[in-house]
Image (cartoon, rainbow, N blue to C red):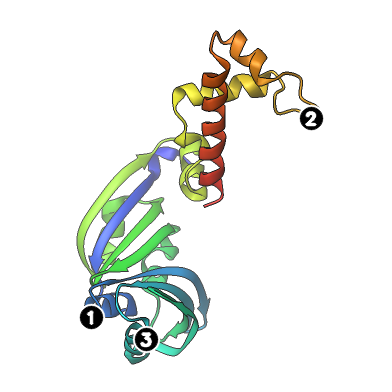
Amino acid sequence: MGFGKAWLVEMQDYHYGCKDSVLTEKLHDTSLRLIHHNKLDKNTLESWSVFTGLNASKAWNEIKKIKQVKNPKLVCREKGRLVVFGTTVQDSFLDGCFLPAKNIKLDFVARDGIEHTKIVSFEKPSKLASRIREVADVKKVRKKRIRSAAELFRHLNGHSPIEVLSEKELEYLRQACSRGYYDWPRKTNLKKLAKGNQSSLSSFSGAVRRAESKMLKTALK
């Protein structure tokens, strides 16, 4: 596969035939994120995380009224958030437009009646948008070409923890790794690493600790 033909596409559209736009158009202080999607014959089993500034009971009552959803089940409810299972009775918008063309959905959220979708596409974004316009009113399309395997895997796997580091933090971690600081047993210590880098112990150790904290928080999100 040539990476010159892979794109990161971010799209906003109105799609009033689906429960996402119907619900969030009615409840303007509410957003809906798809967290599970499984095709079942003519229907699609989905689960959604619903975030709302409204009373959670009101949001749940509105969900039960949406005709595109069959047998909705409230999995859990807390202040400002619900998790709901349900079966969509129409063919999925994402299935119909993205999957046959071997496009990969990375993220999806609906707010105020507008769907926000992020996709890795292996076709021209203009062709993808044209197909989506058959079932939705596309408001905005942003595209960026993916030029390497590393960049593709970053999008597919989420942000790399390394991307959150400053150049200094990354360099200090590389030195620590290459000199055995993270080996067991350790082959060096922070004092020796700081001295070899002509840095104070507090400055060097502080940068390493910050880098470790950033990477862990990113990786465990």
Marks 1 and 3, how far apart at CA: 15 Å
- Where does residue 70 sit, x and y in percent of width and height? 43, 90
Q: Is residue 17 visible?
A: no
Q: Which residue is mark 1?
A: 26
Q: Are marks 1 and 3 in contact (CB under 8 Å)?
A: no
**What residue sits 33% from the left and 83% below the top?**
59
Report whether 110 appears left or right of 163.
Answer: left
| Residue 116 picture location, percent across and down | 30, 62
Q: Taking 175 as reference, is 219 above or below it? A: below
Is the residue marked by circle 2 packed among few (<14), some (14-19), or many (20+) residues within 10 Å? few
Marks 2/3: CA distance?
53 Å
Q: Residues within 10 Å of mark 3 (few under 14, many from 20)?
A: some
Q: Secondary structure at mark 2?
A: loop
Query: Which circle's residue, 2 or 3, is located before the other in the chain?
Result: 3
* Contact check, label 2 and label 3, Cβ < 8 Å: no
Provide the residue designation for mark 2. Answer: 184
Q: Quadrant of residue 80?
A: bottom left
**What amino acid type should be assigned to the residue bearing mark 3?**
Ser
The Cα–Cα distance between marks 1 and 2, rounded to whole angstroms, is 58 Å
Q: Measured from the top left, where is residue 147 in percent x and y?
A: 41, 36
Query: At 43% from the left edge and 65% from the top edge, which residue is drawn?
Result: 100
Task: Please tell me which residue lies in front, 96 or 193.
Answer: 193
Question: First in sequence: mark 1 or mark 3?
Answer: 1
Residue 65 makes an appearance in the image: yes
The secondary structure type at the circle numbered 1 is helix
Q: Which residue, given by chain and number where applicable, does mark 3 sit on?
A: 57
Q: Residue furthest front?
A: 202
Instruction: Look at 26% across and 49% down and name the residue there.
Output: 142
Measured along the vertical axis of the image, is residue 177 above or below residue 212?
above
